[in-house]
Image (cartoon, rainbow, N blue to C red):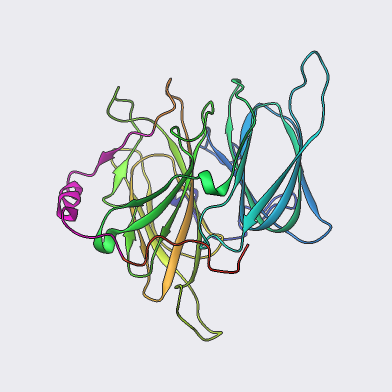
Amino acid sequence: MTQESWFYPRGTLAEDGWETVVDSGIHGWHHTGLRVAELAEGTERVLAAGRVERLVIPLSGSFTVSYVPPGERGVDVEHVQELAGRASVFSGPTDTLYLPTGTALRISGVGRVAVAEAPTEDRFPVAYLPAAAVAVELRGAGRSSRQVHNFGTPAQLDAARLIACEVITPAENWSSYPPHKHDDFVSGGESRLEEIYYFDSAVSRGLTAPDTADPFGFMRAYASDAREIDILAEVRHGDVALVPHGWHGPCVAAPGYDLYYLNVMAGPDPDRVWLISDDPAHGWIRDTWAGQPVDSRLPYTRPEGTP
């Protein structure tokens, strides 16, 4: 694997007890970060206070977050927030916790947890968002239908730089499509944002598969100008793709397997806004959605009897 591919299979970004660490230690990466860990009973992960804002996102399981925000008048007081979480990323939205720059934290519990990050000096209030309050968007139509959980977008979360959401693409559907980019600053038209894709895949809801099943999907990114990027990868549980620039999309769910990805974005522009430009070769496809229904399998919500 070369740096220019910007694709990292599961485990290749492991560091200090985290299964995945994306930060400025990756050459050419500046504005976003991500940490993912699998916690067992009696284990925890600790993050020191730093000049970075964070969003704690349960992927599966439940967690306790103990945190010490920057104290007023020099006094630091530990706070505790329980995150109910969910059975899996395919079980509907989760509750999340936003922590401002300068906050130390400790995460304990059982399951998989993600921490999205963005460097900043600006401080916003701590914010807990329950799952029931997450804006769920059904985007596209037909075989381009997907479900978006907008817990960390500007309309839902007050933050300095960080933008985050997650997408569920049912089996055989396409998402992150038409291919688009956000790597130039055009006031009111396009914003500069690095983007992290963290993937998972599972046997499609309602299907029974043998133990030999190997859930997967595909992801594509390619150059929009002289800056090189070329990703055409099979993606599986725990894989990461980084998009510093260029056209990206589609993400395709293979037959029999649903696809999930967590998106983390941030950039250097003065405003925290997600504005895109479609690849002109494919942008016309949006017009074909008119009059098509959204995939009847959506929305994916919590199955009866699950946390």
Q: Is residue 175 left or right of residue 264?
A: left
In magenta segment, residue 40:
no
Q: Residue at x 84, y 57 (%)?
A: 42
x and y percent of residue 263 in the render? 47, 47
183 shown above or below 17: above
* Residue under the image location 42 percent in, 34 percent down: 193
Q: Residue furthest bottom?
A: 210
Span of residues in magenta: 274-295
Q: Residue at x 53, y 25 (%)?
A: 160
Q: Residue at x 39, y 55 (%)?
A: 147
Q: In the depicted view, which residue is nearer to us: 179 or 232?
A: 179
Quarter in which the C terminus is drawn = bottom right
Q: From the viewer's perspective, tell me whether residue 93 is left or right of residue 114.
A: left
Please tell me whether residue 56 is drawn above or below residue 267 in the rendered image: below
36 shown above or below 172: above
Query: For this rendering, which residue is in front, 63 or 181?
Result: 63
Expressed as whole percent of the image width and height from the top left, the position of residue 204 reads 44, 73
Compared across the picture, whether 286 is left or right of 300 comes to left
